[in-house]
Image: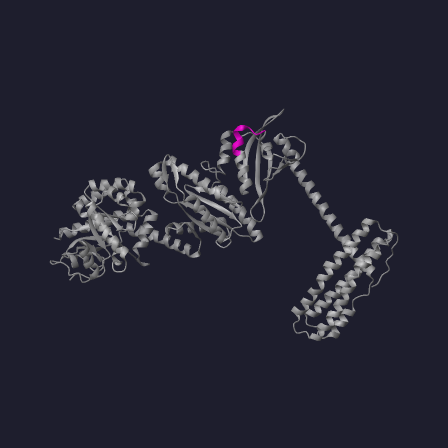
Amino acid sequence: MSQRIQTCGDPNEAEREALYQLSEMASMASVEASIPRVEELLLADAPDLQQAALDSLCPALAHYRDLLLAVAPAQRRFDQLRLLGEECQRNKVAAGILAQGIGRVIRDLLALAKRGALQCGRDISVAVEQLPTFSALEVGLALQAYHERERQLLQAELQRLRQHQQAGEELRALSGLGCWELSPSNRLQACTRARELLGLDQGASLIDDGQNLLLSHVLPADRVILQTLRNHALISGDEYEVNYSVSVDGIGTRRLLERARGVTDSNGEVLKLIGIIQQVENQSRDQVAEAQLSLFDPLTGLSNRSHFHRSLQREIENCAGDSEVFSVLVVDLNRFKQINDTRGLSVGDQVLVEVGNRMKRVLRAGEHIARLGDDEFAVIAGSADPLAAALIAERLALSLNQSLTLSGVALNLSASIGTSSFPFDGTDGEALLLSAETAMHEAKRNGLRFAAYQPEMSQRIQRRASLEVRLERAIRERRIELHFQPQVDLQSRRLIGAEVLARWQDPDLGRIDPGEFIGLAEESGLIHALGKLVIEESCQQWHQWRSSGGTDLRLAINMSCKQLEDDGFIAFLAGVAERCQIPPRDIDLELTESSVMRNPAQVVQQLALLREHGFGVSIDDFGTGYSSLSHLRQLPITQIKLDRSFVSGLLQSRRDLSVVNATLTIANDLEVSLIAEGVETAFQAERLQALGYTLAQGYFFDRPLPASVFAESWLSLAEPSSGSGSPP
């Protein structure tokens, strides 16, 4: 393989330095790194090689390495020589063939090792002996040949890039498009066509004070929205499209269409804003405004739902190609409807603007916010995994937890937030948004600030959707059964009333827990139909018992504060009572303390109307809603029901005993009746009576019973119950 290589002349200083550096690089980096890798491969791929074989291999490889290390001094000797011009290419070809031979033998050596063919030192020695003999000068020429080839490839690639760039310039010129780039440091780079369209100086293409120059010839009416869009894109990287007018000296007004978006790094930081502009036909102001509304929410200035979905799709495409992760957060304000109803829509709008501003202030680079509609917002968090999304949700929740003062009135804000992450919780925009919304509803139902999506949440959503359909049908077909739990006088153990409790037995799913289907009715709005059904059935049952000679009986009917929002509810209740000939004083409407305390000012007016019609009003689950005595004084109530949790803790907790005593004091102070619920043992009944309680209900007296069983067990009794856990 040895070939004659002709040299002559003296190289110049630059050539000597280049050859020296090249040889140093080759000897230090390529050779030094290759030998340990060869040894590692042999050990990894042929673990059964005998130690003798390794002992023979290592000196052979060391010999090969020594030859290559001789390149450096050989190159210094080569400094005194120079390749003959007409023989240059021929010499490079020869050197290349030589180097190829070296590489082929080494590859064969490694292949033998991988196949386990190297069983002894003799085989290795034979393979190594196939290495060609060569001089250090020939190795240097081989290295120079490869260097020359890489240089030629690089030049060819640069030439192709220049051709593509030239073609792009020609296409932009033919299309009339102008392009520009704006950095976060306000440096503007614009092509000739862009400067022409914008009316800028045709001098240097790289310009300082870029934002002001881009706006310098824009008409004042378009300047604010254009600057807002560009600033938003520089922070978020979002894409936008906008029409605006510029006034150019000597030409007049021209209409431009601009499309731009941010270019971001792997961390979501915006590196620059790139845009294209073209001249378009004049458009009316209405058309321009319509174009803006297609991308941004007019109230908050945030991206709207349409713009959000476009940004979400772009994020999916970017992350899918690079196997990256990002997250979506959905933010929904709590009790925003109450703000609108009690403070007015204008105050509600101010709240939404402030909420948007608060969240924008705590978001960071790569986190983009939009308003999806009403009081629902969404955030795209680039590069955020589920843990990072939770931290972002915490930031947002804390920013909204601070009270807001409008027109001298302090409003307490809070939100429920759900998160989902790509690609774990969805690989398309609709799935990711649905997952985040599902998590948000889970957080809202459980009183949490935020929740991360879990697959079982979707299962619960599907069950709730199925139950909602079934519940609506059950209400319509009047398949909700009423059970009655007796309320008794603690001293005489006589029946004084009954609490009406709704029960639902689905033909396919069986018994549905009341807490589940009543909560579902509250959320879905079916509570209005369910409440009316319970009132009608209860009053009809009372009338039937009364017509059959039953004694006077007070009915305690649970209701939701949402029913009071229905302007026709009180008239409906009064009409049913009249038709069934039941005195309003025999109906107690029970509302939970927590629901009343959410908005006592609004509830008090409706409760006052109920009292004017003669109906009783009871506060249920008292002690769990954190109501104050001042609030209770304002409520036109007739009864308080002590929550069962305090009754069950009479023996174990001093605090529970204190609440039981305090509640009795409050009831006496307000001059309302007091009933303890959840009484399950004789000791609890006796202890409550000793403390001064007169009325109670619970499993000690009887469980909730179907109407027929209740009538047979309680309405036909001539003597009071013995309180032995069920009536005698």
Pinpoint residue 391: horizontal percent, then vertical percent.
47, 50
The reply, left or right, for residue 285 in relation to residue 532 is right
Q: Is residue 568 above or below residue 95?
A: above
The reply, left or right, for residue 597 in relation to residue 697 is right
Question: Residue 656: which quarter of the image?
Answer: bottom left
The reply, left or right, for residue 262 in relation to residue 685 is right
**Image quadrant in which the C terminus is located:** bottom left
Magenta stretch: includes residue 589: no
Q: Is residue 587 above or below residue 4?
A: above
Question: Residue 271: which quarter of the image?
Answer: top right
Pinpoint residue 197: horizontal percent, then vertical percent.
62, 31
Residue nearer the viewer, 721 or 693: 693
Pinpoint residue 667: horizontal percent, then vertical percent.
21, 48
Q: Which residues are magenta?
A: 217-225
The majority secondary structure of the magenta stretch comes to: helix
Residue nearer the viewer, 563 or 467: 563
Magenta stretch: includes residue 224: yes
